[in-house]
Amino acid sequence: MTTTQYETIFQQVVALLQQHAPQPGPIQEDTELIKDLGFDSLKVMEMLHDVEDAFDITYPLNALSDLRTVKDFTMQIQAIIETS
Amino acid sequence: MSLISKLDAIAETRKAILPPGVDPFNVVIDEIYSPTEASIEGQRVLLAGSNNYLGLTFDRQCIEAAQTSLEQEGTGTTGSRMANGTFAGHSNLEKELARFYDCSNAIVFSTGFVTNLGVISTLAGPGDVIVLDADSHASIYDACRMSGAEMIRFRHNNMEDLDKKLRRLGSRTDNTLIIVEGIYSMLGDCAPLQEIAALKRKYGAWLMVDEAHSMGVLGDNGRGMAEAAGVEQDVDFIVGTFSKSLGSIGGYCVSNHPELDLVRYLSRSYVFTASPSPSIIASVREALRVIQAKPELRTKLWVNAERLYQGLKALGFELGPDLSPIVAIRVPSKEKTLLAWKTLLDQGIYVNLVFPPAAPAGMSLLRCSISAAHSPEQINFILETFSGIKHLMT
């Protein structure tokens, strides 16, 4: 896991979250998807489809229970990419 | 936050959405007169949201079979299938279901919901993968969670997305179960089952089809979407319910894999649930005979479905994509949906109101389900009433 990969993924994740966030605002690593960006279950699903296409990965629904912040999300995506 | 204070948010939402005295999710039917008519709040209403596709809830033969069973076998089994609740009727119904589907094995459960919980959570486990359609029923989602398998969702009826999801799994498709429904319960649209079966073959995965809304409705023999699409040999497991076309309550799974019989030893919702009452089983067995003996019921159902679907379409309503006995009308907002629902009820028609997330893609719906028991006059009344309230729904 390298910092460069993480940064690249983080920038893409931020861009995708900005497209989908019901409550737009600045997005940092510790920004929370539900509390700060206003995502609900339906919006999360819509956003996940685009994330999957952007990274050509499959995001298992089981991972949602561990997802709170943008940093969590980025690290999950990085882990999926590395194990694909 | 105390244990129950999290429910405060639900109370607030209910208060914000529902006017005092109106709760479309707790409608009480005071009296029921027939498969299509009942009394609600002292008013005679036409039932246009009952899932009673073949109208068998008042079938004379089914009622008599249940009455005879009540007299001869009593009111309940008072136990689970495994411990003390398998009666000859349960066993006979399983044989009859297997014969109906031309399958080697069948298991009967107490409801459709626990059928999915029991079968899916037993077949799949940690290390396995379930690929499910995004619009799957809540019982399928809950069952997948219970299983401990990796859950992957594909876009509703999107074969390109399903292909992509299966491709990314590589060799893991050997222990991947694809789950779809024959007819989807909210919009009434059908699964493209020939294409799904082709992808199943291409990647060597397993396939389960939930025929809850399509059993008795589709196929030359009423076996459902797999029969209608000509892919029964590709479907590893079919699950379904007794609570729609068969007019009662309960559920089942059929398969040509002999291992299905072992599911009953491991499925907690089979082992630890009281089995269906003998009178329920008797009426279901009779209903299964009726749907085989009277294919004209299916013909009538589709004539009625077409009359309602095309009629509403001609009136300019936005409907689900496929003609089916479930006719869902899209309404622009929750408030308008509620107002239209209440106005319909006041004018003598009961339909289902569906808000997101129960309805897909954030939609609010008025959901009608048509029955073979509806008369042309009743359907005309539904159309005339919808026409009269259209201004409330745009």
Image (cartoon, grey):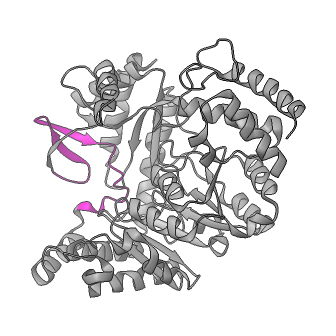
Residue at 49% from the left image edge and 67% from the top image edge: B239
Say left or right for B153 vs B348. right
Bounds of the magenta segment: B33-57
Question: Residue B262: image x %, image y %?
Answer: 49, 82
* B355 over B272 or under it: above or below: above
Q: Where is residue B21 in the image (x, y as percent from the top left)?
A: 18, 25
Q: Please determine whether, in this image, residue B120 is positioned above or below residue A10.
A: below
Q: Report if residue B50 lies within the magenta region.
A: yes
Residue B8 in view:
yes
Expressed as whole percent of the image width and height from the top left, the position of residue B75 reads: 13, 73
Indicate left or right for B186 with B293 as reference.
right
Q: In the image, what residue occupies the spot 31% across and 35% down? A: B381
| Above or below, B1 relative to B304 | above
Q: Which residue is drawn at 49% across and 69% down?
A: B119
Name the quadrant of the N terminus of chain B.
Answer: top left
Q: Choose top left, top right, bottom left or bottom right for residue A66.
A: top right
Q: For this rendering, which residue is in front, A56 or B242?
A: A56
- Taking depth in this image into account, of B169 and B317 the one nearest to the observer is B169
How far across and how far down the image is residue B386, in percent?
Answer: 37, 28
Residue B333 part of the magenta-drawn span = no
Say which quarter of the image contains residue B247.
bottom left
Q: Residue at x 59, y 15 (%)?
A: A23
Query: Quick one: B332 or B125, which is closer to the camera?
Result: B125
Camera-nearest residue between B343 and B16: B16
Total count of labels: 0
